[in-house]
Amino acid sequence: MPHDSAPQPLRARAAPAPLSGRLRVPGDKSISHRALMFGALAVGTTRIEGLLEGEDVLRTAAAMRLLGAEVERLGEGSWRVAGRGIGGLTEPSDVLDMGNSGTAARLLCGVLAGHPLFAVMTGDASLRRRPMRRVTEPLAATGARFTTRAGGLLPLAVEGAREPLPLDYRLPVASAQVKSACLLAGLCAPGVTRVIEPEATRDHSENMLRHFGAEVRVAPEGTGRVIELTGQPELRAAPVTVPGDPSSAAFFAVAALVVPGSRLVVENVGLNPLRTGLFETLREMGAALTVSNARTEGGEPVGDLVVRQGELRAVEVPAARAPAMIDEYPVLAVAAAFARGVSRFRGLAELRVKESDRLAGTAALLSANGVKAEVEGDDLIVHGTGGAVPGGGVVATRMDHRLAMSALVMGLAARAPVAVDDGAFIATSFPGFVGLMNRAAGGEAIGPA
């Protein structure tokens, strides 16, 4: 697996040609994880089309098999899951290795909390540095018992609750992962599980719960929402079509905005309004970015992104927008590096607990390539060049796939090539990224360093 392999240094040079044509990015990672988990918790057989087949999602598939569900690949992106029903998962015979996926690990804590079984979960070196206490503390109120390393770190052992209790939990910080873990635990508990989030976060779990037949109620509260789930439903198998991941489309959108002469269409992108903060921000920066062929598939809005290169201007992004674009800040920072003026992205504390300290890593990425950037508290400040960035640096990716891809996008329009110390982790979320970007750029812009 990539997280155990030798480093794969990569270098990106100026694109041989403007980015052009039409392409599709892999399926949405958030929806792919959830489709496998909900399929395993449903009664009957769920067919999934467009599943992301990156390492992160394959770890979820393997975990659901170990927990007793039948999970079978039928063809490219096409999968079948024969579920066990709510409360029907069985004790795994081996350790659940979640690789590099914090989403899978945290959501799975919620699944395990509601089942009367014992399980041990681990991950790669990066995941073992990421805190799990933010989910294990609220989930302990169900009656589940969690044992972790000091600091709430993996490996983690869980004894699920035999008679799980419903939760009533107010999130201290907006987090779709924590919210979803609480809702997953609530499936096995009688009564109503209630989660209050301070800011609205991506709602794929709520949408998919309804799609599988659960009763979910959502009401606004200030800038956030109150989500109520009626426990112990009978989830019924339902087909899932996974749209293209907007977080993956982001790299192609920004590349097309900064490589001179580009016009690119990214087809079939998920456009859930709680995931499109980046596209809104890019438009505020003056980006020529429009949507065509808008439609709804499987309860999620979908469309084709049409992106044209053009001059960008600096922007200030409020903290309230962070949940709608939390994974896109590194590539947004790349766009800001090419923009005219000084950009400020506020309230990025959540970036400190991603695959790496992504806030520090993004600032270091820019600085290594001649772009002035600094971190003030939880804010990132980027001094745009108003044109091509110097480039020429080697970026420490810190086992973070999004830092690696963002640095390579920068190299496509920088004055000197940009290198990353390890691109192996890109496969965790975007298998085939390098080949797809090279095809769009008309040649081998990205290759071995």
Image: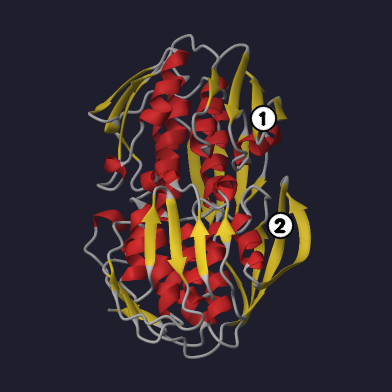
The image shows residue 260, relative to residue 361, as above or below, that is: below
Horizontal placement of 228 versus 349: left or right? right
Residue 258, given in percent of the width and then of the height, sits at 54, 79
In the image, which disc is placed on residue 287?
Answer: none
Looking at the rendered structure, the secondary structure element under dot 2 is strand
Residue 274, given in percent of the width and then of the height, sits at 64, 47
In the image, which disc is placed on residue 236?
Answer: 1
Circle 1 packing at 10 Å, graded few (<14), some (14-19), many (20+), is: many
In the image, which disc is placed on residue 302?
Answer: 2
The C terminus lies in which quarter of the figure? bottom left
How much space separates mark 1 and mark 2, taking CA atoms?
Answer: 24 Å
Q: Amino acid at mark 1?
A: Arg
Quarter assignment of residue 407: bottom left
Q: Amino acid at mark 2?
A: Val
Horizontal placement of 99 versus 413: left or right? left
Looking at the rendered structure, the secondary structure element under dot 1 is loop
